[in-house]
Amino acid sequence: MPYTEEEGGRLNNFAQEPKVYQAEAPDQKQQTLYIILGSLAATLIIGLVFVAFSVST
């Protein structure tokens, strides 16, 4: 672990930094999955809004 010593003998413990990497673009299969999950999420939200509106009136 990386320690640094300050004046007066105090030690500072710094977190270990993760390795940095460049993100890769999603492939066709992942893009299709994102579209399916996004449409399911939108359907769920629309359904919840409809139920909330129906119950409140």
Image: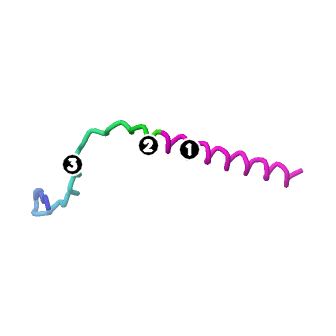
- Of tags 3 and 2, the one toward the viewer is 2
The percent position of residue 55, horizontal first and vertical second, equals 85, 55
* Other-residue count near label 3 (Cα within 10 Å), few / some / many at <14 / 14–19 / ≥20: few
At horizontal 57% and vertical 43% (from top left) the residue drawn is 38
The percent position of residue 46, horizontal first and vertical second, equals 71, 45
Spatial CA distance of label 3 from label 2 is 24 Å
In the image, 34: left or right of 45?
A: left
Looking at this view, is 48 or 57 the one in front?
48
Q: Name the dominant secondary structure of the magenta segment.
A: helix
**In the depicted structure, whether residue 14 falls above or below residue 27:** below
Magenta run includes residue 47: yes
Looking at this view, is 24 or 4 the one in front?
24
Label disc, if present, on residue 30 of the rendered structure: 2
Residue type at mark 2? Gln
Residue occupied by mark 3: 19
Residue occupied by mark 1: 36
Secondary structure of the residue carrying numbered label 3: loop
In the image, 50: left or right of 30?
A: right
At horizontal 89% and vertical 50% (from top left) the residue drawn is 57
Secondary structure of the residue carrying numbered label 2: helix
The first of marks 3 and 2 along the sequence is 3
Looking at this view, is 55 or 44 the one in front?
44
Spatial CA distance of label 1 from label 3 is 32 Å
At horizontal 17% and vertical 60% (from top left) the residue drawn is 12
* Other-residue count near label 1 (Cα within 10 Å), few / some / many at <14 / 14–19 / ≥20: few
Could you tell me if the residues under marks 1 and 2 are in contact, i.e. CB atoms within 8 Å? no
At horizontal 49% and vertical 40% (from top left) the residue drawn is 32
Q: What segment is highlighted magenta in the picture? A: 32-57
Magenta run includes residue 51: yes
